[in-house]
Amino acid sequence: MLCQDEYIFNMELVFCCERTMIWARFAPQESCMSRTRHLILSNLAVCLLFSTLAAAKQSADQVQIGRNIVVQSGENVGDLVCVGCSIFVRGQATGDAVAVGGSVVLEQGAQVAGSVTTVAGDIRLQDGAQIGGDVTAVAGIVRRGPQSSIGGDVTSMGGAGWALLVLVVPLVFLGGIVALIVWLTQRSRRVVAAPA
């Protein structure tokens, strides 16, 4: 027995039946409209999953944590992000390169179209390496060969003082917030003795 409404979704006709199909076994109180919404949302989720996988497959971006990224000669990639590791470019990167806790090394003939940024790491450009954007090294040093080129600004805040500022100051701030919360909690728990 079919419900009054028939829905067309994803080029297939979905019929909603009254407690005669498998649906009734799982949710006998569920209405026809509720089952149809469930089917539509399920199909949307599957479509979204496949479209995201397709977009990720087409993307040439690389993100690594704890493993170095190596772009071989002749290879063309997008953005490069590395946390706790280094980036070695021999080919081309059409996006930016960012390394936190690691270095970025552009070997001879390497090209990065965007900016290159490191935090607690160095940036090294060998002869013939090219960067189209800005170069920023926080708690690191920028070293470049005489035949290398940088299209934007170069900022190098090297030394242990910047590492201390970047890494320790946020931890001290967070510790202050935790201490404040503990103090406020202890203050609210104090029992005041009633006069006898």
Image: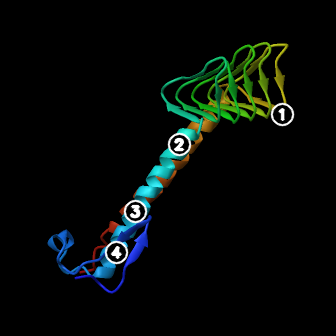
In-front residue for pair 53/133:
53
Specify whether 138 is left or right of 51. right
Between the residue at mark 3 and the residue at mark 1, the CA separation in whole angstroms equals 49 Å
Viewer-nearest of labels 3 and 1? 3
Q: CA distance from mark 4 to mark 2?
A: 30 Å
Tell me the distance, in whole angstroms, between the alpha carbons under discs 2 and 1: 32 Å
- Nearer the viewer's eye, disc 4 or disc 2? 4
Residue 122 shown left or right of residue 83 in the figure = right
Q: Quadrant of residue 191?
A: bottom left
Name the kind of residue labelled 2 in the image.
Ala
Mark linked to residue 29:
none
Judge whether 152 appears above or below 14 on screen: above
Q: Which mark is residue 153?
A: 1
Residue at 68 percent of width and 21 percent of height:
91
First along the sequence among labels 3 and 4: 4
Residue drawn at (43%, 59%) of the image: 181
Give whichever of discs 1 and 4 has the lower sequence position: 4
Frontmost of labels 3 and 2 is: 3
